Amino acid sequence: MSLAGDTDVPGRTTEAGPPHDKPFGPRFVAPLYVGASLNPVNSSIIATALVAIAAALHLPVGDTAILISCLYLTSALAQPAAGRLAEEFGPRRVFIAGIVLVFTAGIVGSLAHSLAALIVARVLIGAGTSAGYPAAMLLIRRRAEQAGHEAPPRGVLGGLSITGAATVAVGPALGGLLVAWAGWRSAFWINIPVAALTLILVLTGIARDPDPVRPGSPRALASRIDLLGMLGFGGSLAALMIFLSALPHLDRPALVAALVLAAALVGWELRAAHPFLDVRLLVSNGALTRTYLRNGLTLMGTYVILYGLTQWLQVARGLSAYQAGLALMPMGVLTAVTARVVSRRTGVRLPLIACAVLLLVGAVAVLFIGSGTPMAAVICVSAVFGLTSGAGTVANQTVLYQEAPAATLGTASGLLRTFGYLGAIASAAITGIAFHSGVNDGGLHLIAWVLVVISALVLVLTVLDRRLAEADRRHAKSPRTGGARNPTQCTATATTESTESTERRSADMTTGTHTTATIDPARTALLLMDFQPVTLGAVPDSEGVLARAGEALAWARAHGTQVVFVRVALAAADAAAVPAHNKTFSQVAAAGYLTDGTAATAVHKSLAIRDHDLTVRKIRVGAFASDTDLRAELRARNVDTLVLAGISTSGVVLTTLRQAADEDYRLFVLADATADPDPEVHQVLMEKVFPRQAEIVATADLVALSRAEEPTARH
């Protein structure tokens, strides 16, 4: 079964079958790095053009701050939206659409003669460049899966951060040079050749998305991408930006609008079938939420210096745009260098603590900068923030890859950038307040005091985060060479000792010492059973189990494996038909816990259902006791192997395994994507009962098991 549908064409390489010798070669990574750098380079270049734009349009310098804010507002919404669209329609398609928007924005900005036209150009730039990062993260994960790698090389993910850091490094100097040589319009038309080059690289280096586009009806599409959620998110951000831009004047209507829209958004997302902003995930996955906050605060501190110091150098110190850009180049260079160093590490806690400490040191140092300070000292202080930016960006991205559910990595990656943009929007507001009455030393010192508070918050948020230490310990215990553990494995949260022992046992089994089992993905079905709010709350580490179920789902998507979602729910007629002597279902039917159509009985929102998936509603414990003839559906698809994961081990997994064994299916149980309210029962079943009829494996073993069978499957 070919995912791309054209792997048999001579001389053609597809995402379904990349070359196994160099799957992450220059042709593949170059367009991703360039595309992901378009947003940061546009962020840094504009900083040196603001004074020139204000002079050309006869505006106060402070009024041009909206060119910063509008890009970040657009990007804050568009980054997770692009991630969601990439998950739905394919990352390559979304990547190309973004490049086309950037090309268009370059033309609009080059021809603009008013602030309104420049705002339109910046909005287009924000929307277009937002596709690069989340699409790149999805393409990298997909390439790793399809090439048979447990994880992409560390340098590939680190390269995204390093490229962004490098563009920030050259951005101020490049912007200053362009503005001095060709005028402020060059900050816009530079996007035209860069976008054209990126488009060529994508078309020649990245294969087409394997799945065809199935938009369905407009209503169904709006539901799948949660259009109302996107609009609510954008509206609340816009109101927040208006409020921040008005400071120090208090715009109460804007504040009230932001709070009301935010409350409405949360209420809607809790009921949405496919939430754009998964509020439940943010609440339950504390490690991921803390990463978002830490990243946003760190970038707020970095950008408030980038924008504030650039304006101060030009106005208070009398430097040209080009000279200001050169003065800040060491800051950007150290960002890139530090990003490269941190990307080679497996630990994240120490780099993040160092980032917070350096941010605090830099903030205090800015308090001692004034108009008479030697430029060498100013450059040294700005360089401290380069160290902070490089360490924080890479380490937070690594934590995101570890903690985000694999099935929603695109949206999660976009949200990481969104929180960064929120920090940038706030930094523009802080700069506007500080320089409201003039760009002078007093305003710069006010920025420094705000930065002291921000850095203190980042330091506390980092030091008290125990999950960072746990993640580092998991890396240290990893048996893989060089301590480089599969990032998808790292998404697992702390598990019980029984689950860990089962995982170790399953890892031994799949090395070939005890079993030669393999999986043919084309004849396999992944059964994700009872991953519903009503059941998740009953088991320990539900967050980690759900994350690993998402990893298994991503594996199935990448290998063309049939996905079956099994959920337990009772319609009114089903509940009425439950006899009183059924100890389990008579109680839940009477209490209404399993009523069909409620949010509690829906498949968890982090596991996105697609059109070609099977969804089975069962009315008893086992997956075969359903309103769908599951046996017939599996036979029609020539499925002879089942991979089971679910909640609970002693319930749906045990019952389904017994029934499937009687049906002569080959069976695999994902020990780390299965849980039971009683960990001891889980351990006994995994170690003493299930091995008699099934292979017990870990989620991370799926790639190796399926890779062993792929050559035969293709023939």
Image (spheres, rainbow, N blue to C red):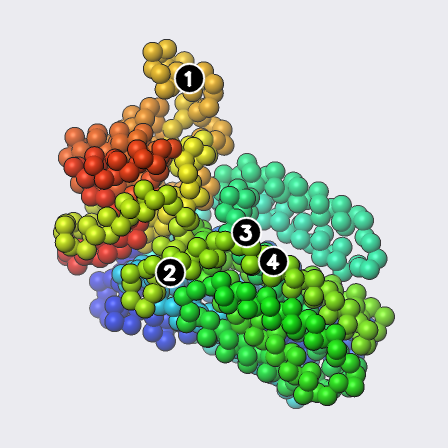
Give the x, y percent position of residue 568: 38, 28
Q: In terms of sequence position, does the residue under pointer 3 or pointer 1 come before the other?
A: 3
User: What number is the disc on residue 289?
Assistant: 3
Residue that carries the numbered disc 4 in the rendered image = 460
Q: Residues within 10 Å of mark 3 (few under 14, many from 20)?
A: some
Query: Amino acid under label 3?
Result: Thr
Q: Please name the residue shown 59% across and 39% down the image.
A: 268
Q: Secondary structure at mark 1?
A: helix
In the drawing, does residue 140 fall left or right of residue 429?
A: left
Residue that carries the numbered disc 2 in the rendered image = 475
Q: Secondary structure at mark 3?
A: helix
Query: Amino acid under label 1?
Result: Gln
Residue at mark 3 to residue at mark 1: CA–CA distance: 37 Å
Choose between 359 and 231: the one closer to the eye: 359
Q: In terms of sequence position, does the residue under pointer 3 or pointer 2 come before the other?
A: 3
In this rendering, which labeled residue sits more in front, label 4 or label 1? 4
Q: Residues within 10 Å of mark 4 (few under 14, many from 20)?
A: few
Q: Please name the residue shown 85% across and 70% down the image.
A: 437
Q: In terms of sequence position, does the residue under pointer 4 or pointer 1 come before the other?
A: 4
Residue that carries the numbered disc 1 in the rendered image = 587
Give the x, y percent position of residue 117: 70, 68
Q: Please name the residue shown 65% across and 62% down the image.
A: 456
Q: In terms of sequence position, does the residue under pointer 4 or pointer 2 come before the other?
A: 4
In this rendering, which labeled residue sits more in front, label 3 or label 2? 2
